[in-house]
Amino acid sequence: MDVNSVYHLFMSLFFLSLVLLGDCTFGLKMRKICKDSIEILSGQGVMIENYHKSHVKMALVDHPDSISNSEFQLSFDFRTTSPDGILFYGRSRGHRELIALILSGGDLIYKVQCPTLHADILLPTINGSRLNDGEWHRISYSIYRPYDTKGHIEIDGFASAKRYIVSCDPLTTLIMGGYSEHDRGQISDLENLQGHFEGCIRNVYVPVPLRYPPKYYAVSVCE
């Protein structure tokens, strides 16, 4: 068994132990983890670990009368020193389409894979600053339908003058901070990123109802 295999086996057993040891235990770097203190929707937030299975899954209600058919909004805060990694990606019910925001060298990249557009777009920031500086940053993303199919993105309150056409179906799944094993093989661009996001995500807001509470995979409490 090579070193990588031993490492992944250890990490899998470690995070399995978090489930088996009860309401509170200690995670990586001796961070205390309690089930009721992990909440990505609140100001407490979660710590995404430097581990390929670390992420948060949010399933959105997919209903003809849902607000998701007229508008989609997502906002959140993040803090990291990782130059590369997934901030979030969303998929439609058919899983053929993808919208994502990722870090690449500290820059923010908007990835769109829709029927009429496949693109990677470098987003401008205030003074061209990079976002892996260990400070909190705020992302706001919105699409309004059916009158406007263009994505609108704000970074720390700074809005790009350009809007980006999005012809994807309404998103039904959001993955924050990493990628789901269930999507492996269908999101090759995200699977092949150089690094994994390691840092905190908090105050996630979506006006669309969730089908069930967020699901947490190998995360700990943000400090």
Image (cartoon, rainbow, N blue to C red):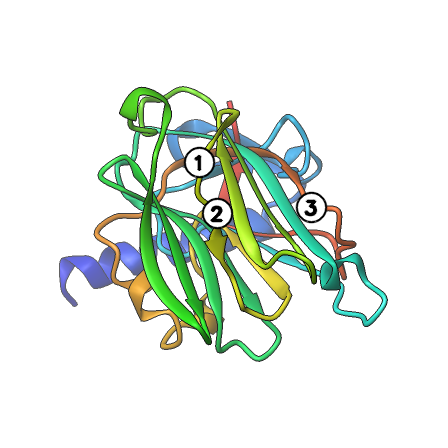
Three-letter residue code for mark 2:
Arg
Q: Horizontally, is 220 left or right of 72 in the view?
A: left
* Disc 3 secondary structure class: loop
Which residue is situated farthest in the left direction here? 2
Looking at this view, is 155 or 93 the one in front? Answer: 155
Where is residue 120? Give x, y as percent.
Answer: 31, 56
- Which residue occupies 78% across, 54% down? 209
Q: Eyeballing the image, is 190 above or below 126?
A: below
Q: Earlier in the sequence, mark 3 or mark 1?
A: 1
Where is residue 51? Give x, y as percent.
Answer: 35, 49
* Residue under label 2: 163
Three-letter residue code for mark 1:
Ser
Where is residue 42? Give x, y as percent.
Answer: 68, 31
Q: For residue 198, which quarter of the picture?
A: top left
Q: Quadrant of the N terminus?
A: bottom left
Q: Which of the numbered marks, if any, corresponds to residue 160?
A: 1
Q: Horizontally, is 28 left or right of 194 in the view?
A: right
* Disc 1 secondary structure class: loop
Disc 3 and disc 2: Cα gap in Å?
20 Å
Disc 3 and disc 1: Cα gap in Å?
21 Å
* Residue under label 3: 206
**Mark 3 or mark 2, whichever is nearer to me:** 2
Disc 2 and disc 1: Cα gap in Å?
7 Å
